[in-house]
Image (cartoon, helix red, strand yellow):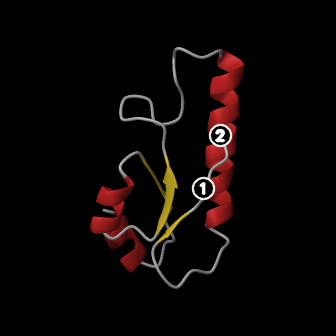
């Protein structure tokens, strides 16, 4: 789906827990997620920790939209 949206000229970033699958499907901008059932949080952690993870990863995703890239890129996350 990402490739089809980008064909229309809309830049997409995919937050993916399976980066190799995202690569093989043609995603250009990828941000690693935490896990399949909880891509942006972990219910075993505190609400504050979950919020920090979400805030950071969504921020990385938004920042990646402003970057010029020439090949498929996985953007680094710190949390």
Looking at the image, which residue is at 32% across and 71% down? 4
Q: Is residue 9 visible?
A: yes
* Image-quadrant location for residue 7: bottom left
Residue 79: horizontal and vertical position, in percent? 65, 40
| Mark closer to the chain start, 2 or 1 | 1
Q: Quadrant for the N terminus, please.
A: bottom left
Residue 74: horizontal and vertical position, in percent? 51, 63
Residue 72: horizontal and vertical position, in percent? 45, 74
Q: Which residue is mark 1?
A: 61
Element under disc 1: helix
Using a 10 Å C-alpha cutoff, classify the residue at mark 2 as few (fewer than 14 neighbours), some (14 to 19) or many (20 or more): few
Q: Name the residue nearer the viewer: 38 or 4.
A: 38
Q: Nearer the viewer, mark 2 or mark 1?
A: 2
Relative horizontal placement of residue 48, taking residue 77 as reference (left or right): right
Looking at the image, which residue is at 68% across and 50% down? 59
Query: How many numbered dots are placed on residues in this image?
Result: 2
Residue 28: horizontal and vertical position, in percent? 44, 71
Q: Is residue 25 above or below residue 14?
A: below
Relative horizontal placement of residue 4, taking residue 51 as reference (left or right): left
Disc 2 versus disc 1: distance between alpha carbons? 13 Å
Q: Is residue 25 visible?
A: no
Q: Is residue 46 above or below residue 15?
A: above
Q: Is residue 40 above or below residue 65?
A: above
**Do tag 2 and tag 1 residues touch (Cβ < 8 Å)?**
no
Numbered label attached to residue 43: none
The single residue placed furthest to the bottom in the displayed view is 70
Looking at the image, which residue is at 70% across and 32% down? 52
Element under disc 2: loop
Using a 10 Å C-alpha cutoff, classify the residue at mark 1 as few (fewer than 14 neighbours), some (14 to 19) or many (20 or more): many
Looking at the image, which residue is at 68% across and 24% down? 49
* Image-quadrant location for residue 26: bottom left
Q: Which residue is mark 2?
A: 79
């Amino acid at each position: 789906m990402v490739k089809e949206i980008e064909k229309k000229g809309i830049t997409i970033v995919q937050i993916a827990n399976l980066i190799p699958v995202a690569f093989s499907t043609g995603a250009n901008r990828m941000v690693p997620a935490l896990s399949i059932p909880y891509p942006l949080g972990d219910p075993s952690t505190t609400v504050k920790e979950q919020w920090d993870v979400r805030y950071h990863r969504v921020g990385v995703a938004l920042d990646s939209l402003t970057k010029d890239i020439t090949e498929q890129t996985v953007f680094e996350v710190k949390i």
